[in-house]
Image (cartoon, rainbow, N blue to C red):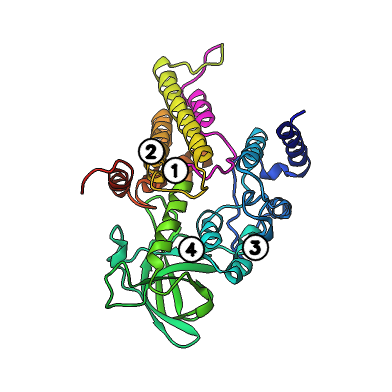
Amino acid sequence: MSEQTEFREEVAAWLKENCPEAARGPGVIPNGSSKIVLEPEMAKWLERMAEKGWTVPTWPTEYGGGGLAPTEARVLYDEMGKIHARSPLMGMGTSMIGPTLLEYGTDEQKQRHVPKIARGEVQWCQGYSEPNAGSDLAALTTRAVDNGDHFVINGQKIWTSGAATADWMFILVRTDPDAPKHEGISFMLLTMDQPGVTTKPIRLVSGSSPFCETFFDDAIAQKEDLVSELNKGWTVGKRLLQFERSGIGGLSGGARAANPSKGLVRVAKQYIGETEKGQISDPAVRRSVLDMNMRRSAFQLTAQRANEENKSGIPGAATSIFKLVGAAMQKDTADMKRDIMGFRGIGAHEEVGFTADELKATEEFLHLRTTTIYGGSNEVQANIIAKRVLGLPE
């Protein structure tokens, strides 16, 4: 028996014994917020996986990770998929600031912040975009002024996902207003639970309010929470965006509770019907679903190969390709699901006869329009691909 086969059997046995039924299939995935009370079974699942280091299986063990090789992590995700186990933890802590601190943080910063992320004890949010600094992020004006042992921050951020429930924020601030705009920016960490930070949720067309406006009025960031050097935050900020785009584009390799492609088949059979052989009854719909499934499988296999071929383990400009294609595919899947459901896929009110699943499909359809915008719009990604991947002239 090979080592990988033995490891797979050990993982499968452990998951079978330790993954609660309530953590299998679609449902809530913890984001680490200390302000959100988890259902007991999900709290148990998070605790058990954190003890194994499998909330972040490839992170170093000294910071709460599992210390697994990428191939071992893939085995873990495969086995989780087989029993439809949901990821025990998600959010900006594991996908964005954690990897960034492992690369750019001091030993003290890693010890203080990363294990808490791995254990799901804190939720992080991102302080990047401003009302007048979105795609042109370097035009930001939120200011941080040196005040001895800390910085004083004043300004505003917008579209700060999860700010209302987050414990900490990583933020880009201007620390030298006289320097060229890309060179006078610093990357800092600050706690959200302080008098100088105010959040106001933004209600979206989907009905949810995951985004917020965030205001800073003499907010405090400690000197020890300056990441990298003063006025060198643009480099750190760009690297974090690469980690973000890796996650959106499917390069992070995380486990998923359910295969969206199988979800399309289920929905099609429910709303279109199925033959005696168990096929989708409408040939045209069957072909469309097959094409989408093939696209998704090809995309996932390409992402897996890209991960395996990446010797450094650090995402590069090619992540923009996966973000661009992955975001479009998510939107296209939601569009197809809505089309298959017909008018049942545009329900907005439970009281007029739409089911919870149908209302969820409408919210998903509306929300997934945003995947082509956040994390860098499709147009921004296309520019990056043209310049950094294809080497085309300006």
Q: Amino acid at mark 2?
A: Val
Name above or below for residue 175 compared with residue 160.
below
Q: Amino acid at mark 3?
A: Pro
C-alpha span from label 4 to label 2: 25 Å
Residue 35 horizontal/vertical position (percent): 59, 66
> Which circle, 1 or 4, is nearer the viewer?
1
- Please tell me whether mark 1 sits on a helix, a strand or a loop: helix
| Residue hosting label 3 | 115
Q: Residue furthest front?
A: 311
Rate crowding at label 3 as few (under 14), some (14 to 19) or many (20 or more) other CA atoms within 10 Å: many
Please indicate whether residue 19 sits to the left or right of residue 226 in the image.
right
Mark 2 in CB contact with mark 1 (< 8 angstroms) = yes
| Residue hosting label 2 | 325
Which residues are the magenta region?
250-276
Name above or below for residue 298 compared with residue 24.
above
Residue 97 horizontal/vertical position (percent): 51, 60
Q: Is residue 218 visible?
A: no
C-alpha span from label 3 to label 2: 33 Å
